[in-house]
Image (cartoon, rainbow, N blue to C red):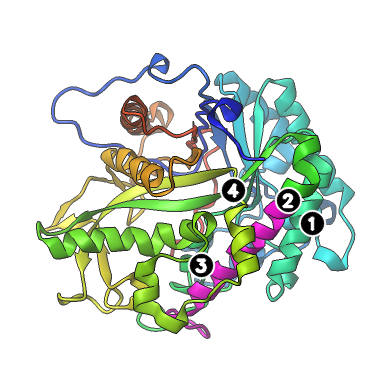
Amino acid sequence: MKVTVTQIFLLLLLSLVHSFAEQRSNEEEEVERSQFPSGFLFGAATSSYQIEGAVLEDGKSPNNWDVFCHIPGGIKNGDTGDIADDHYHQFLEDIEIIHSLGVNAYRFSISWSRVLPRGRLGEVNPKGVMFYSKIIDNLLLKGIEPYVTIYHHDHPQELEERFGEEFVHFAETCFENFGDRVKYWTTINEPNLFAEMAYLWGRYPPAHCSAPFGNCSSGNSDTEPLFVLHNMLLSHAKAANIYHHKYQLKQGGFIGIIANTLMCEPLRDIELDREAAKRALAFYIAWMLDPLVFGDYPPEMRQYHGNELPRFTSEETKLLTQSLDFIGINHYTTLYAKDCIHSTCSSDGDRAIQGFVYLTGERHGVPIGERTGMRRFFIVPRGMEKIIEYVKERYNNMPMFVTENGYSPPEKEDEQEEDLVQDAKRIEFHKAYLAALARAIRFNCGPMAFSTRFLILNCLSIGLV
């Protein structure tokens, strides 16, 4: 069963994770709820490891992040998720806060190691199931629609070497225990980002990489990300197939996947860089989404990777192309793209795995937008319009949710409490990006939903060293 516009309506999910804003030359553009269709839902979102804490309580097993964050030098300031926002103990208060904001959607993820501490080798943890059931039930009592991500990059540490079929088992466990109340599922959050951060740069567990991208004890940055994403897409497709054939008809829900997206603009006003900008989108966004819609990787990737790029069987292609009810996109930044095929670039841009493209946030020392607290995140609201149009056109107007967008402020030593409470820059950011989204909708290329993470500020910004 495929989702339609009339089935999902136009949802505006606001998921809490990061944020941006664009400098306006004169007066700030105002945005009002009336600019969005009546069916849009405003919401909030989080991920399990970044907020829950209770690292080994009530039967939860250690996950990959529990281990990684305790390796010296792995995370900035030595931060861990051992306590985080203590959501595990304070979820009722957090739901009250969500409700007090007037939102009516909440996206969260389920901790694999809390529900299935040992995967298929062990039993379902009833205390873990009870925890998420309480969250779902209390959300519904408040009139808040739960949007559940099955996998947000945290899994039991012992499953590091056997992800695929284990994930399908975990997904079905979620469908069985929560599907009677959850109508919107995403299988995997940002598999393209996970493959890049964990297997190209080595900044997420298991920290695989090779020169010039990093100095890890193992890994091959030029090829390993290709196989990791390949396997994650197949895991998604198998889980979605089970949902469509076994659960969707009786539970009445929908299932999709979430891609990390960035918009790219040419660094120089030349055709080479305009092509590089297109190529960067193909090597990052279409790398993940093309197989799910068209059954194979983008032609540009086949051209430059050759036999290094895995191939799908005909049966796998069928599974992939029937796996989506909607596309979720997370959008945080816009960058400049420079061609590295015919131009001299730094060593990391001059590689096939990067599409022979160098990405930067500056042109002649001038940033593309206002800086944030994240090194590669800049406030460029026009990028929101452009990325929505790109996904809409490339994927034949498939139902789309903007599942993450948000703002991380630059660190300031002299930050005053009043500044933190008023949070003026975040307000400016959200106004600018919501205005950009409203323009996209006005010009008939709007998404089904929008999410920003602002409610419970994630205690741990993972992977930053």
Residue 240 covered by magenta stretch = yes
Dividing the picture into quarters, in which one does residue 3 lie? Answer: top right
| Residue at which label 2 appears | 54
Quadrant containing the N terminus in the rendered view: top right
Q: Position of residue 436 (x, y in %)?
A: 31, 31
Q: Secondary structure at mark 4?
A: loop
| Residue at which label 3 appears | 195
Badge 4 density bin: few <14, some 14–19, many ≥20, Cα 10 Å: many
Q: Earlier in the sequence, mark 3 or mark 4?
A: 3
Amino acid type at circle 2 is Ala
| Residue at which label 4 appears | 324
Query: From mark 1 to mark 2, how far is it between C-alphas?
Result: 8 Å
Residue drawn at (48%, 82%), measured in percent from left and top? 216
Residue drawn at (47%, 83%), measured in percent from left and top? 220
Drawn side of residue 223 relative to residue 356, left or right = right
Q: Secondary structure at mark 3?
A: helix
Amino acid type at circle 3 is Ala
Residues marked 1 and 2 touching at CB (< 8 Å): yes
Q: Foreground mark, 2 or 3?
A: 3
* Residue at far top of view: 34
Q: Position of residue 215 (x, y in %)?
A: 43, 82
